[in-house]
């Protein structure tokens, strides 16, 4: 079990009030309130299509909410992603979005652009100020690579990293903007258990640096072990918010997302349903068994006499019958010959 320092405070970093997002007649997010405090890890769960990523997009300026407001440290966020990043919020995406043909170090340096004050002309002329800023950015990028354990792969192309390390690199790039809050959209998607455990350790380490974390995840064991608080979205609305144990034990969450309780005996309703199904199956089996003798009786001969008559009909012909048939054939031949002769004379 990982031991971490409790850095949670009551200082509000992010506050969303009544956030609603509509696309035409579809309401993807409806009246969601959420607060994240400094040094806190908050989880956001819910079934597919619940509006989690849409809510993230509203927080980071990719979408402008139809209704509601989003503030960071008391200031309303501008509806532009790069301005949100400059304000102090960074994020990762559900699908990895690295520059695959750039090195690991270069990918992290991309995340430093919002903290670099040198302008275009300074970059083109490569004056002393630019060189100093470039050296500082590179030093900071190497610190972050060491933090995630990839400093020895700084010169490797991003596309050559294993999947789990690509996820880590994306987090390092987000941290390069020196955020006060980082939003992680399914950071363990596609990971094996060892990679998931490493991601959990990394997020705890981020929290221990005083950075607040808001994370979307479908791995319930991961989310309940990681988060100080958990909020559940269902059909775009917040169903419940509380500690991991409170959310995990809520019957509405179990019904809407988790499926069945983790433990415990079935309730009276479930028992009655099973008994009714078993009784119905037994009744159908008995009805089928009663119908079988009747079907058999219909296929058997009714009497011995009828069976005997059928045998007589199928009996082979006798010698007398054969002679009678021969005489009939002869008469038929004679008649045919006579008719032919008559036709010849007429011609």
Image (spheres, rainbow, N blue to C red):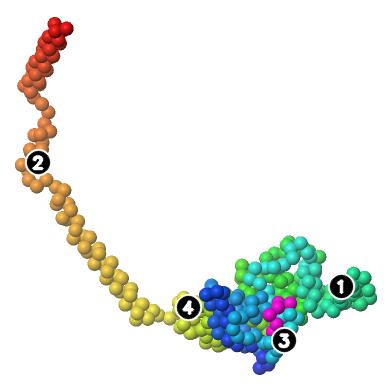
Q: Which residue is mark 4?
A: 256
Task: Assess disc 4: are there few (<14), some (14-19) or many (≥20) residues with their C-alpha within 10 Å of its C-alpha.
Answer: some
Q: Is residue 338 magenta?
A: no
Q: Is residue 78 magenta?
A: yes
Q: Is residue 302 left or right of residue 53?
A: left
Badge nearest the viewer, 2 or 4: 4
Q: Which residue is mark 3?
A: 210
CB contact under 8 Å: marks 3 and 4 = no
What residue is shown at x 90% (from left), y 74% (from top)?
122
Q: Is residue 4 left or right of residue 285?
A: right
Query: Tag 1 or tag 3, which sits nearer the N-term?
Result: 1
Task: Assess disc 3: are there few (<14), some (14-19) or many (≥20) residues with their C-alpha within 10 Å of its C-alpha.
Answer: some
Query: Tag 1 or tag 2, which sits nearer the N-term?
Result: 1
Real-space CA distance between mark 2 and mark 1, rounded to the nearest whole angstrom? 109 Å
Task: Assess disc 2: are there few (<14), some (14-19) or many (≥20) residues with their C-alpha within 10 Å of its C-alpha.
Answer: few
Q: Secondary structure at mark 1?
A: helix
Badge nearest the viewer, 2 or 1: 1
Q: Secondary structure at mark 2?
A: helix
Query: Tag 3 or tag 2, which sits nearer the N-term?
Result: 3
Badge nearest the viewer, 2 or 3: 3
Query: Tag 4 or tag 2, which sits nearer the N-term?
Result: 4
Q: Which residues are magenta?
A: 77-82
Q: Which mark is residue 120?
A: 1
């Amino acid at each position: 079990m990982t031991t971490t320092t409790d850095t949670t405070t009551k200082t509000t970093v992010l506050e969303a009030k009544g956030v609603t997002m509509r696309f035409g007649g579809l309401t993807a997010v409806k009246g969601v309130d959420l607060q994240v405090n400094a040094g806190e890890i908050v989880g956001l769960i819910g079934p597919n299509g619940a509006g989690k990523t849409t809510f993230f997009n509203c927080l980071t300026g990719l979408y402008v909410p139809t209704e509601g407001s989003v503030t960071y440290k008391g200031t309303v966020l501008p509806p532009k992603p790069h301005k949100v990043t400059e304000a102090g919020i960074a994020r990762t995406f559900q699908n990895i979005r690295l520059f695959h043909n750039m090195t690991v170090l270069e990918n992290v340096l991309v995340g430093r652009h919002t903290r670099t004050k040198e302008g275009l002309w300074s970059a083109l002329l490569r004056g002393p100020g630019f060189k100093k800023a470039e050296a500082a950015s590179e030093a900071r990028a190497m610190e972050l690579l060491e933090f995630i354990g990839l400093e020895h792969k700084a010169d490797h192309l991003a596309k050559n990293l294993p999947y789990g390390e690509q996820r880590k690199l994306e987090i390092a790039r987000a941290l390069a903007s020196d955020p006060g809050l980082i939003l992680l959209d399914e950071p363990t998607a596609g990971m094996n258990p060892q990679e998931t455990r490493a991601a959990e350790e990394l997020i705890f380490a981020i929290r221990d640096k005083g950075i607040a974390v808001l994370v979307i995840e479908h791995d319930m064991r991961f989310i309940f072990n990681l988060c100080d608080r958990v909020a559940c979205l269902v059909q775009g609305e917040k169903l419940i918010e509380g500690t991991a144990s409170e959310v995990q034990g809520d019957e509405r969450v179990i019904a809407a997302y988790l499926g069945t309780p983790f433990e415990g005996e079935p309730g009276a309703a479930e028992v009655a349903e099973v008994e009714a199904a078993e009784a119905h199956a037994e009744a159908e089996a008995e009805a089928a068994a009663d119908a079988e003798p009747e079907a058999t009786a219909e296929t058997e001969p009714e009497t011995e006499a009828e069976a005997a008559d059928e045998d007589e009909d199928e009996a082979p012909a006798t010698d007398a019958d054969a002679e009678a048939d021969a005489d009939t054939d002869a008469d038929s031949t004679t008649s045919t010959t006579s008719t032919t002769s008559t036709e010849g004379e007429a011609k």
